[in-house]
Image: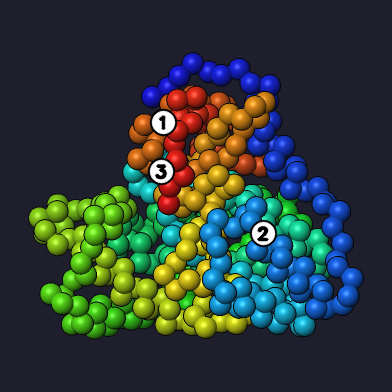
């Protein structure tokens, strides 16, 4: 649904370019006086800033962050952050299979969060996207070629943003599949955990509430064979849970004192720092689209879900940002006044 174009002082294109340029500008911060302990305290305060944190952090998470920061500062090495990321673009979106403005907005959000730390701590930071790759075709019924294309395109977007980031800020991608000896070894691990999980579950499948059922339906391109099985959603969730056991078994994130784990919203273990995806959004960027919401003479960056998109009132503005290629970056949706009631969604 579209509405007549809104006249604004700042165009969408100039707004996005301005936000990119702002990322380059120094903040003028200095490291606190008082030695190593003062620096650690200053870094922890910046990381826990309510300007970026969307949910409260449990005491044990805060303690872990202190320990992790102190560990790296003592060794004078980059701080380590790991973000859990589904390596695909929701197949229901016209933007699929490539990243769009949602991915760019999230990268800007995380860059702005870490920028003050990089300014006061010379070794800088490494922000690593721990991406689900080999499991996506099995869960969502999209091809591995599509997953690979998304990861490659996302890497190009990371490279583009790095041109605006501080030199001591590094964003990387680590596919889960790369931690196994081979795709066959990955399949064997998941199959083993699936068999064990099936034997442990009453009735062989998990019991899902309505929200979980809807989430499975949204993400999975269900085959006719699956749809004929009344328990297909539960079986997809069971496979997902078996995969999560295999993923944890890699040791890449579990019980790692050196890593600070991050996500858009709280995860069950409570040991992830919840950052959302923009100042106004907690929607996962890989299953949503990035849009601009008029705000005075400028805009606000918002990520909305596929369902919200069906109800949104918007118009498109052409965009041309040097170095930002791909069909999804040639125009952007601008929400109209009727869309102001759209609530953030996970």
Which element carries disc 1, helix, strand or loop? loop
The answer to whether residue 89 shows anywhere in this view is no
Relative placement, left or right, of 28 versus 176 is right
Relative placement, left or right, of 90 versus 208 is right
Quarter of the image for the N terminus: give it.
Answer: top left
Quickly name the residue at label 2.
49
Mark linked to residue 305: 3
Quickly name the residue at label 1.
312
Q: State which mark lies toward you, 1 or 2.
A: 2
Mark sitting earlier along the chain (1/2): 2
Mark linked to residue 263: none
Q: CA distance from mark 3 to mark 1?
A: 10 Å
Q: Quadrant of residue 304?
A: top left
Badge 1, how many Cα within 10 Å: few under 14, some, many 20+?
A: many
Q: Quadrant of residue 187?
A: bottom left
Contact between labelled residues 3 and 2, with CB atoms less than 8 Å apart: no
What residue lies at 62% left-to-right and 65% top-to-bottom?
Answer: 127
């Amino acid at each position: 649904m579209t509405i007549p174009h809104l006249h604004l002082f700042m165009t969408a294109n100039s707004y996005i370019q301005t936000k990119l340029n702002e990322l380059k500008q120094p903040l003028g911060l200095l490291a606190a006086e008082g030695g190593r302990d003062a620096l650690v305290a200053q870094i922890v305060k910046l990381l826990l800033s309510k300007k970026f944190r969307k949910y409260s952090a449990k005491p044990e998470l805060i303690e872990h962050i202190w320990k992790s920061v102190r560990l790296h500062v003592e060794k004078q090495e980059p701080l380590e952050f790991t973000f859990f990321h589904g390596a695909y673009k929701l197949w229901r979106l016209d933007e699929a299979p490539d990243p769009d403005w949602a991915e760019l907005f999230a990268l800007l959000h995380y860059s702005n969060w870490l920028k003050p730390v990089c300014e006061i701590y010379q070794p800088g930071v490494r922000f690593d996207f721990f991406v689900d790759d080999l499991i996506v075709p099995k869960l969502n019924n999209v091809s591995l070629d599509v997953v690979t294309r998304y990861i490659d395109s996302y890497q190009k977007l990371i490279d583009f943003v790095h041109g605006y980031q501080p030199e001591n800020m590094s964003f990387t991608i680590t596919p889960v599949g790369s931690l196994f000896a081979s795709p066959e070894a990955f399949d064997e691990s998941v199959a083993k955990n699936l068999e064990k999980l099936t034997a442990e579950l009453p009735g062989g499948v998990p019991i899902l509430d309505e929200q979980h059922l809807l989430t499975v339906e949204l993400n999975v391109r269900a085959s006719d064979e699956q749809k004929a099985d009344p328990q297909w959603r539960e079986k997809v969730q069971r496979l997902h849970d078996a995969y999560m056991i295999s993923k944890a078994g890699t040791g890449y994130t579990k019980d790692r004192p050196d890593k600070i784990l991050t996500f858009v919203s709280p995860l069950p273990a409570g040991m992830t720092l919840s950052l959302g995806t923009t100042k106004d959004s907690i929607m996962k960027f890989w299953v949503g689209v990035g849009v601009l919401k008029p705000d005075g003479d400028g805009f606000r960056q918002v990520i909305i879900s596929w369902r919200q998109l069906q109800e949104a009132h918007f118009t498109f503005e052409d965009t041309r940002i040097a170095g930002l290629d791909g069909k999804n970056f040639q125009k952007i949706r601008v929400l109209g006044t009727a869309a102001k009631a759209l609530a953030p969604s996970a």
